[in-house]
Amino acid sequence: MRLISTPPWLRADGRHARRAQRPSHRELIWTTVVVGMAFEARIADGPRMHVICSADGPVLATLLAGADIIKDCRGLMSFGVAGGLSPSLRPGACIVGSAIVSTGTRVATHRAWSRALLQSMPDATYGMIAGVPAPIAEPEAKRALHIETGAIAVDMESHIVAGVAVAHDLPIVAVRVIIDPAERTLPQPVLAAFRPNGTTDIVAMIQSVIRQPRDLPGLLRIALDAAIARNALIRGRQMLESALDLADTRQVGPCPPGNSFDHRHAISGTNGDQISGST
């Protein structure tokens, strides 16, 4: 596993340093991309992308609610890795969210924008993403969340992004890559290494392994999964530019409730319209 320190362009408060000042007129329309980890921010960085990084839910909500973030934003994108809830999803599988679910709420993603993402990433799975405030580490908890919500993946940022999108009437999409599959337990060293600013606490990870050496095999397994997920995330990011051009989020409203899961992977879900990645 490559352990990423804070990139030099990522400010301490999680905002993208190169977007800290008000952009010129030609740059007024951008996509705000929200990630939870520093390596995700590095991958997401690019033209027309205003990247916000924080693994702390309340801090992330405050950053997103800022007037300088929302003003002139064309839409919100939740981007990065996720835990698998559907047993069929393997590390590196790409998810385009049909909706974001959390504690009884459900926010549909933008239909045209999601369609464009599926066209640019034809191997992606289309399904609901659950948002939670803390990591879901155990397979039993993942299975229970899958059954309860129908979501096929889980992360700790998408529900916050969805709440801001609803509050400010902005379109939202989600692009996530599976890092830990449904049957995989997140070992304690991984949980110990999380920092609120999205970087990795290497010292805490090493200390955890020293205390519990039996966690080392699980840590190595997650390291391999993380490498696969990171490579898939990079490939997905390279395809995003065409999706930004294909979807005019300012003219088409959000997807209606009841979107089904991906048409090509036959994952069971709710009734409703399907969005094909091949049309």
Image: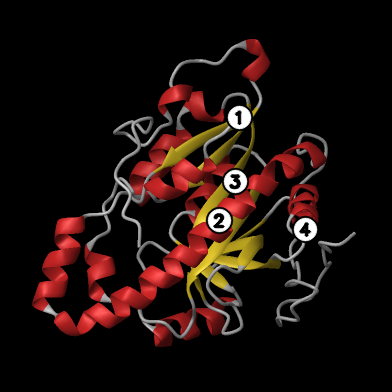
Q: Which residue is mark 2?
A: 233
Q: Is 55 located above or below residue 273 in the figure?
A: above
Q: Secondary structure at mark 3?
A: strand
Badge 1 amino acid:
Pro
Residue 77 tag number:
3
Give the CA separation, mark 2 to mark 3. Answer: 14 Å
Mark earlier in primary sequence (2, 4)? 2
Q: Secondary structure at mark 1?
A: loop
Give the CA separation, mark 1 to mark 3. Answer: 14 Å
Q: Secondary structure at mark 4?
A: loop
Where in the figure is residue 266, as x and y percent of width and height? Answer: 76, 81
Assess whether mark 2 and mark 1 are in contact (beta carbons under 8 angstroms): no
Residue 47 tag number:
1
Where in the figure is residue 197, as x and y percent of width and height? Answer: 30, 45
Residue under the image location 55 percent in, 63 percent down: 177
Where in the figure is residue 81, as x and y percent of width and height? Answer: 49, 60
Mark earlier in primary sequence (4, 3)? 3
Give the CA separation, mark 4 to mark 3. Answer: 18 Å
Q: 91 or 138, which is in the foreground?
A: 91
Residue 256 tag number:
4
Camera-nearest label, 4 or 3: 3
Q: 44 or 149, which is in the foreground?
A: 44
Badge 4 amino acid:
Pro
Give the CA separation, mark 4 to mark 1. Answer: 30 Å
Residue under the image location 78 percent in, 37 percent down: 245
Q: Quadrant of residue 99?
A: bottom right
Badge 2 amino acid:
Leu
Mark 1 neighbour class, 10 Å CA radius: few under 14, some 14 to 19, many 20 or more: few
Q: Secondary structure at mark 2?
A: helix
Badge 3 amino acid:
Met
Mark earlier in primary sequence (4, 1)? 1
